[in-house]
Image (tube, rainbow, N blue to C red):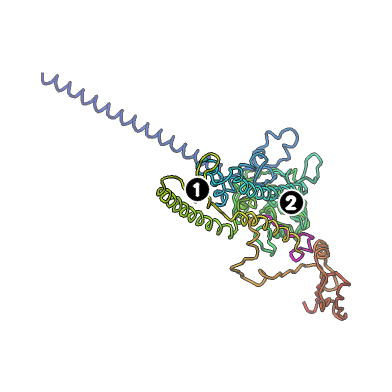
Amino acid sequence: MNGSLRCFSWKIIRKKLFFKKACCQHVASDSETQNEELEKRGKERKRNKKNKTMRMIVSNLPFESNMWKENPNRYYDSNKIKTTKYTILSFIPKNIVEQFHRFANIYFVAIASLNFVPVVNAFQPAVSLIPICIIMAITAVKDAWEDFRRYKSDKEINSMGCLIFRKKEQAYVEKCWKDVQVGDFVQLHCNETIPADILLLYSSDQNGTCHLETSNLDGETNLKQRQVVTGFFHQNSEFHPEFFQNTIVCEMPNNDLNKFKGFVEQPDGKKVGFSSENLLLRGCTIRNTEVAIGIVIYAGHETKAMLNNSGPRYKRSKIERRMNMDIFFCVGLLFIMCLIGALGHGIWNGTFSEHPPFNVPDVNGYYLSLALAGFYMFLTMIILLQLVKLGQVFLIHNDIDLYDGERDFPIQCRALNITEDLGQIQHIFSDKTGTLTENKMVFRRCTINGNEFSHQENGERCILLSPAPPTGYALLLPSGAAPSPFLPGHSTEPMELWILTSPTAA
């Protein structure tokens, strides 16, 4: 009996131990598979996150014919820009909403609404609509004209020309800026404006550098250097876009002008990195470089210059902001006056058993409260303020002192709401004298040891842009020649600088 019990208990213990061991093994295997799945998910998330923060660009040349639908660059924005605020359908509702930023317009609408209530109307409802309609109509015409000028400016910029390489012609063809696509190869020449953000792949400079003027972006007139991407600089050979088989991987578009990184992946898997020193930004101008070639990285509204442009917004002058506060206090004061007058009028009328003879009812039998007739506002001042702004714009556009004779370009008043803020400068921060004055030194030509070295592009630019020299200036000539003073009005030749050196002096 005891032996059978011992055998039975031993079997039960063995079964429990075996079951426990099997369960532990099963749990361990399940935890391992779960860890593997978590690792796979983590890698996929990192890969997806990396793809969201990086952009892949290839050449458009293999996809030119009928294979554009297979081009991975087709999802990127085109180079066409649009800075207008309104469309034909959205102009009326959007402009009305913006005009209600003025507290005076809200006041006039409230007065017009009250006059449609028969009990409290002070005068004819149609008459109350005249002031608000006149004010909003004048402002709407002014805003429409301002936006139409933006449309003309966009059309002019989008129609500017640049050279794009086409596989069919095997040459660079002139196209409009709006036709530039991400992945196109663009050829730039000296004094030409850059149409998009371009990765520099070739420069005619012996050192593989390209000089830029970034005054349109940061106001700096000092030239900045950009380098050709490492591995593409060949001093004695030209760049052929049809041989470009690499893949460019860079960061997504952002508005940081000084931040740019990525790499060029070659067909053999080798990666070559690049940075902001290899990027030509839209709006900059090529200087002192005959030819530069690059591939478009960002176009249109994805360029760094356009991302830094927040677009047209409603601007209010200091007088308008001050008027909003003044009108707010005037309305509050008027409300208190009307409330006190209405209470006093009611108490005073309560002392009479019947209406006094001087209180005559209107046609409908309603008695007009004397306090309701006190709704007044300086309507003419607000209407005349809009007319005065239009007059200021006309005078600014026709001011001869604000005319740029070098470029034959008058001043452009693009914000018609803040003309009265012109010239109201409170603080000036300057780090050097060149910020307030104009230090302009352009290299034209020089002679070294009897050999003349000239810069044709800068020479032509000097002749076109230089004004007549003032009295007292002298031309610097080679050693031994007598200086010849300028005669006012007889010459428009800019000053030439001749530098003479000798082998002994060297």
What residue is rendered at 51% in x and 54% in y?
331
Q: Is residue 187 visible?
A: yes
Report x, y in % for residue 433. 66, 72
Q: Is residue 224 magenta?
A: no
Left or right side of 239 for 109: left
Left or right side of 470 for 312: left
Q: Amino acid at mark 1?
A: Asn
Picture quadrant of residue 178: top right
Locate the N terminus by quadrant.
top left
Frontmost residue, 331 versus 289:
331
Report x, y in % for residue 132. 61, 48
Labelled disc at residue 293:
2
Q: Is residue 402 magenta?
A: yes
Residues under numbered marks 2 and 1 in contact, where contact means CB atoms less than 8 Å apart: no
| CA neighbours of label 1 inside 10 A, class few (<14), some (14 to 19), many (20+) | few
Q: Is residue 83 visible?
A: no
Residue named by callout 1: 359
Q: Earlier in the sequence, mark 2 or mark 1?
A: 2
What residue is rendered at 72% in x and 38% in y?
62
Picture quadrant of residue 80: top right
> Which residues make up the magenta segment?
400-414
